[in-house]
Image: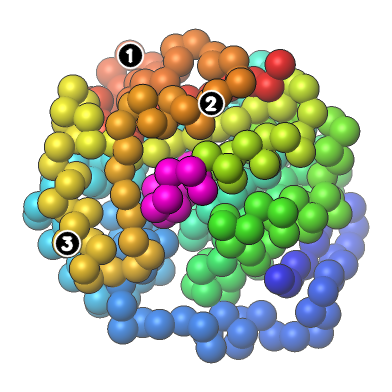
Amino acid sequence: MLIIGRHNGGGTRRGRGEGRDVTDEARARLNTGVAHNARVWNYWIGGKDNYEVDQQVGEHVAGMFPLIREIARADRWFLGRAVTFLAGERGVRQFLDIGTGLPTADNTHEIAQRIAPDARIVYVDNDPIVLAHARTLLTGTADGATDYIDADVHDPDAILERAGEILDFDRPVAVMLLGILNFVLDAEKALDIVRRVMAAVPSGSYLVLTHPTHDSEVGGEGQIPAMKFWNENATPPITARSGEEIAAFFEGLELLEPGLVSCSQWRAEPGSPAVVPQYGGVAVKP
């Protein structure tokens, strides 16, 4: 793993891998011949950090399942509302954002540090193009801290070890797992990841999670053939889960109102987007 940089106070301090060109390293791992989720997701929300293959697969999936663009936007808006709520109403000052994806407007650190300039944010991803853009993420306030870890969600112990270099695990942390556990195909492994990460943070910490569903009551049945096409033509492979399976990630935690709902409806304003087949919820650790 490589921590590529840190903005904390007035200076930048490199972690392991000091002196290496992380852009070259990312480029060496980048495969532009196969569509990748981070880039296709970026395409769906109107970004420019994608390639022709990502656009082609993105268009095909959107043709099979037109709601996908609404899901992408709703998931992003959920992030904004959840971080605003936690930093503002709940006073959270530490965020561990696992599976951050490509930087766009209003990233976690920007939202949190507008409310609390001393907020500390650690991003985690292992996609090469995200790594290449990580310097964009690493622009936080002088009073707070913003860090980026190149690591895989399948290795929670490594994530926690590196995140502990900037986050204080004796104080509450908001653990953010937005649209990432759907890439952990084994249900028990996905549950174990959540349990291990939440076991490492103290009482008063939060789990913020979104996950696609195939539940028909929120229009999720159309995801099944679209995901089959995705798994045959893009990477990494993905799965949807039922609301009951997704609720299991919050076991032992206290779900906050309005509970586990379509992420477009979580604490949404009147006139918010329609229900989408992507559940979202926020829970606190007792």
Question: Residue 124 at x, y = what percent?
Answer: 62, 56
Q: Is residue 185 rendered magenta in the image?
A: yes
Residue count near mark 1 (Cα–Cα under 10 Å), binned few <14, some 14–19, many ≥20: few
Where the N terminus falls, by quadrant? bottom right
Real-space Cα separation, disc 2 to disc 3, in angstroms = 30 Å
Return the residue nearer the eye: 130 or 34: 34
Question: Circle 3: is it few (<14), some (14-19), or many (20+) Cα within 10 Å?
Answer: some
Residue 98 in view of the camera? yes
Which residue does the numbered mark 2 point to in the structure image? 250
Percent coordinates x, y for residue 50 in the rendering:
35, 70
Mark 1 or mark 2, whichever is nearer to me:
2
Q: Residues within 10 Å of mark 2 (few under 14, many from 20)?
A: many
For the point 46% across and 81% down, the residue is 30
Residue 273 quadrant: top left
- Give the residue at x 17% y 53%: 226
Give how far across and how far down residue 71 sits, in percent: 29, 40
Is 282 left or right of 59, judged from the image as shown?
right
At mark 1, the secondary structure is: loop
**Residue 112: % across, % down:** 67, 36
Check disc 3 and report the residue beneath it. 229
For label 1, the residue is 270
SS at mark 2 in the image: helix
For the point 57% across and 80% down, which residue is it?
26
Q: Residue furthest top?
A: 257
In the depicted structure, whether residue 69 falls above or below residue 216: below
Which span of residues is magenta-colored?
178-190
Front-most of 283 and 101?
283
* Magenta stretch holds residue 111: no
